[in-house]
Image (spheres, rainbow, N blue to C red):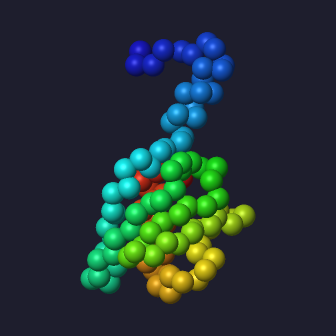
């Protein structure tokens, strides 16, 4: 048996929270390529989990806030990112990396 059964419910909830919450400690630049152009972005938010509604990123030296609406769709309220393909690719990369 690979996993031991958990008898204490409190321990189980703490363990679940550890699996679902990620801490973006290292603000390393992440790269993404769209239409043969390279973009680098950095995630500025410290805690990333399924329950958050905002993610702060720095894209090409400018800070943006990505917001999740009721339908679990992410968007940039400033509408400063005119390339929607780039925005969707960044959100998809964050979703895959942090499992949100």
Residue placed at 55% from the left, 27% from the top?
15
Viewer-closest of 26 and 12: 26
Residue 4: tell me if it is visible. yes
Residue 67 falls left or right of residue 91: right
Q: Residue furthest right?
A: 70
Residue at figure coordinates x 50%, y 82% from the top left? 81
x and y percentages locating residue 12 in the rendered image:
60, 23
From the viewer's side, name the closer residue of 78 and 89.
78
* Residue 48 percent across, percent down from the top left: 53, 50
Number of numbered callouts drawn: 0
Q: At x 54% / y 40%, what residue is drawn?
A: 20
Residue 35 or residue 26, whichever sits in front: 26
Question: Where is the N terminus found, in terms of image quarters?
Answer: top left
**Position of residue 38 measured from the top left corner of the image (x, y, whole percent):** 29, 77
Give above or below for 26 relative to 58: above
Q: Quadrant of residue 29?
A: bottom left
13 relative to 4, above or below:
below
Q: Residue at x 57, y 16 (%)?
A: 6
Q: Position of residue 79 (x, y in %)?
A: 58, 83
Q: In the shown orientation, is residue 3 left or right of residue 21? A: left
Quadrant of res 71 = bottom right
Residue 88 shows in the view = no
């Amino acid at each position: 048996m690979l996993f031991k059964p958990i008898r204490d419910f409190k321990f189980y909830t703490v363990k679940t929270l550890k699996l679902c919450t990620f801490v973006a400690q290292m603000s390393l630049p992440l790269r993404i390529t769209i239409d043969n152009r390279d973009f680098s972005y950095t995630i500025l938010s410290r805690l990333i989990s399924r329950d958050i509604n905002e993610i702060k990123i720095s894209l090409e030296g400018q800070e943006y806030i990505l917001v999740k609406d009721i339908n679990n769709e992410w968007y940039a309220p400033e509408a400063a990112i005119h390339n929607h393909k780039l925005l969707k690719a960044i959100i998809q990369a964050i979703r895959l990396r942090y499992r949100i």
